Amino acid sequence: MAQTATSATRQQHYHVPQPMPWPIMGSTALFLMALGATFVFNGSMGGWVSTSLGFMILLYMMYRWFGDVIRESEGGKYGRWEDLSFRWGMSWFIFSEVMFFAGFFGALFWARAMSVPDLSSLLSNELLWPGFKNLWPSAGPGFAEKFTPMGAWGIPAINTLLLLSSGVTLTIAHWGLVNNKRGQLNLFLFLTIALGVTFLGLQIFEYGHAYSELNLKLSTGVYGSTFFMLTGFHGFHVTIGAIMLTVMLFRCLSGHFKPDHHFAFEAVAWYWHFVDVVWLLLFILVYWL
Amino acid sequence: MSAVIDSHGQAHDHHGGGYGGIMRWITTTNHKDIGTLYLWFSFIMFMTGGAMAMVIRAELFEPGLQFVNPDFFNQLTTMHGLIMVFGAIMPAFVGFANWQIPMMIGAPDMAFARMNNWSFWLLPFAASMLMLSFFMPGGAPGVGWTLYAPLTVQMGMGMDLTIFAIHLLGMSSIMGSINIITTILNMRAPGMTLMRMPLFCWTWLITAYMLLAAMPVFAGAVTMTLTDRHFGTSFFNAAGGGDPVLYQHIFWFFGHPEVYIIALPAFGVISQVIPAFSRKPLFGYASMVYATSAIAILSFMVWAHHMYTVGMPVTGQLFFMYATMLIAAPTGVKVFNWVATMWRGSLSFETPMLFACGFLFLFTLGGFTGLVLALVPVDIQLQDTYYVVAHFHYVMVAGALFSAFAGIYFWLPKWTGRMYDETLGKWHFWLSMIFFNMIFFVQHFLGLAGMPRRIPDYPLMFETWNKISSIGAFGFGLTQLLFLYIVLKAIRSGEKAPQRPWEGADSIDWTMIPTPAPYHTFETPPVIK
């Protein structure tokens, strides 16, 4: 570590950016969104105005802020020293994302290993919930309706293949970028996005299937909660990843990036692989076992 | 402080990048400006949370209900906790980190200067949301700062604002931590190896790592609360197969590391102050680094000592009890090293050193009561009593807040180029010390006698100690106005500070940068020999 820092500091000036109004705009946007959502969640639909306004401001802010960064990058403001900062930054951001998912996986573990067995044993069983059995998937002792859990070997298995393939196509696209084969880069980047979007489409179809035919809903006890929250947050991350890949595609088409200077692309690739790994865990722990 | 920094601005005309007035502060990417913003924000929040504490202590001055109804009392204790932890103490140390880390490692600024701005400017919005929750139907959440389910699921819409505020605070912490880690790992000047960094930088490196591991988990926990409230999920609902205890586990997985997230930067400040006023290098620097790392790792394995009484297997209790007591080992290494640094040092007791010594005594006391509470059989008696309140205020106030005061007095000359009034500083210390113990020492007795925490009314037998505690609280509150006066007086009309007001302080921020520090420092990396 000490070594990398020292070698990077052969470059004498670190790019310290000028003041900009985007951060405060982002805070305002998030404030409006949260305030609006609070009202919407509590039944005052007027909150949508605030939330939508906030969301539009957020989009505008991101467009301008990323625009500035892209301009600086293409303008040669970032050398190896700044590049290393971005690498550290993205790595630690992904680490924080891992911990976010860890919380929800923890909830799944707790439900399967602790709360459901507890509710079906000894005192809980005799006094509170007679006859409740420790079986997973479970929607809990108070859930009266019947539901069918989501199987692993239909759409989820196809989705696993899709996401794993998208990891491969993304790597091929990256090779294209490194070896300056722009055609390969654009084609395989497009394929990656297509695979990601297909994944999302199938995921939406699966949700529809769960709601309309399996009677499996967000409110289907702790199974429904963990199933939809885990796969839902994952799907949200795939959406973000697909949007970022699309931005990368447009940048590639406009001739951005050089074989030795394309960290934005790599960062998105890292993120995409992270989302991929989360999916593998989901497939094993949520769908399969 | 702004007045002073403005005058710097005129001398070094390239600040602001075209923005003037208030917009300068809103758009700034300068780590010193942002550090100043953090510190002033922290002070405002400190006053806000402090005002709530005053109402709480006024209500507890005597038995019966005098000023507030029980529901509002609960809202006050909740908000007091949230505001002090997330609004006052954490931002104060991030303020120190912003000012000091680049100057201590020879960096031109933080690694991500714009993101640094966003990390700060999320805070006022999050704080407004917390305060806004008081004006919602049903008021602010009155559930305690730990936000336990199932109470949180039943609260009014103030709860939703609080949840979103925590999301924003979490974003701010995560971005701030990424920034600090990257700055320390990638922005050190040539020759500034990791093991030559001032210890303050080390403690922040480790703290930032802990924030990144803990904060997202808390965000997940409150998100589960949100969906349990509005979207029919059953994370914390036994009828749906969930479990309220699950919330406690997730919360304390964040909550216990959070204690060290607050304490480690405080240790860092103390590790700068004590050597400076002992005129000796820090004793056992390497062991300090290892002890800090050990605390960071252990603190993720002790969370359930907050939950001995919710029902867990004896093996679980034993594991968490021993793991908790194990933390005393690295903490003991630290206290030993601080004392050993002073041993045969050429000591002098200016205000920063007084606060450091106060910290040493009182934080150690808070650590000891922590050991007492770590014992399962004792904790079963003492949990949710005033003993716990006394314990964590020794750690949070005499630990974190005192070290923040030490840091302010220590670095104010560097930042503003002016000295504070030493006599008033000493007054501030002694009054704080006396009033602090008046408030909280007696609360140990209240707790041992069985007075529960978070109640607005109590039996007659607790009256005397509560009166003393309340009088101490009012005194402590007023003393902090003296602190404000001292800082303002130093900024406006303080004596001009010499280049090195503390001749024992030898980190590069003192030796290689003029006092007061110019607006931009180390624009090209210095070479550290």
Image: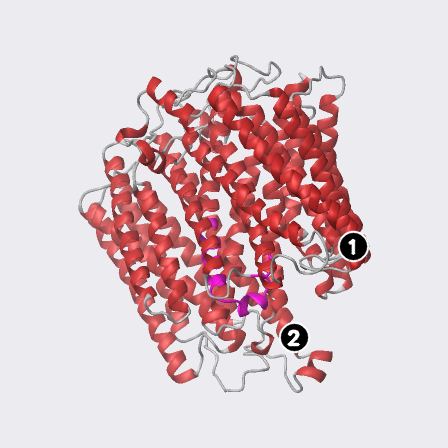
Q: Residue furthest front?
A: B66
Disc 1: host chain: B
Q: How many marks?
A: 2
Residue interval drawn in magenta:
B142-169
* Residue at horizontal 74 percent and vertical 37 percent from the top: B364
Disc 2: host chain: A
Does the image show residue B294?
Answer: no
Image coordinates for residue A53, horizontal then vertical, percent:
28, 58
* Residue at horizontal 37 percent and vertical 83 percent from the top: A212
Q: What colour scheme governs how the chains and residues are painted in the rendered image of this protein?
A: secondary structure
B276 up-or-down from A235: above or below = above
Q: Which residue is mark 2?
A: A117
Name the residue nearer the viewer: B402 or B289: B402
* Residue at horizontal 67 percent and vertical 82 percent from the top: A128
Image coordinates for residue B454, horizontal then vertical, percent:
66, 58
Name the residue nearer the viewer: A96 or B48: B48
Q: Is residue B285 left or right of residue A16?
A: right
Q: Is residue B67 left or right of residue A175?
A: right
Kind of residue at badge 1: Phe
Distance from the alpha carbon under mark 1 to that under mark 2: 44 Å
Q: Secondary structure at mark 1?
A: helix
Q: Is residue B189 left or right of residue A117?
A: left
Kind of residue at badge 2: Pro
Residue A263 shows which numbered tag?
Answer: none
Q: Residue furthest left?
A: A254
Does the image show residue B347?
Answer: yes
Q: Which residue is mark 1?
A: B462
- Which of the 4 image quadrants contains residue A51? bottom left
Residue B159 falls within the magenta-colored stretch: yes
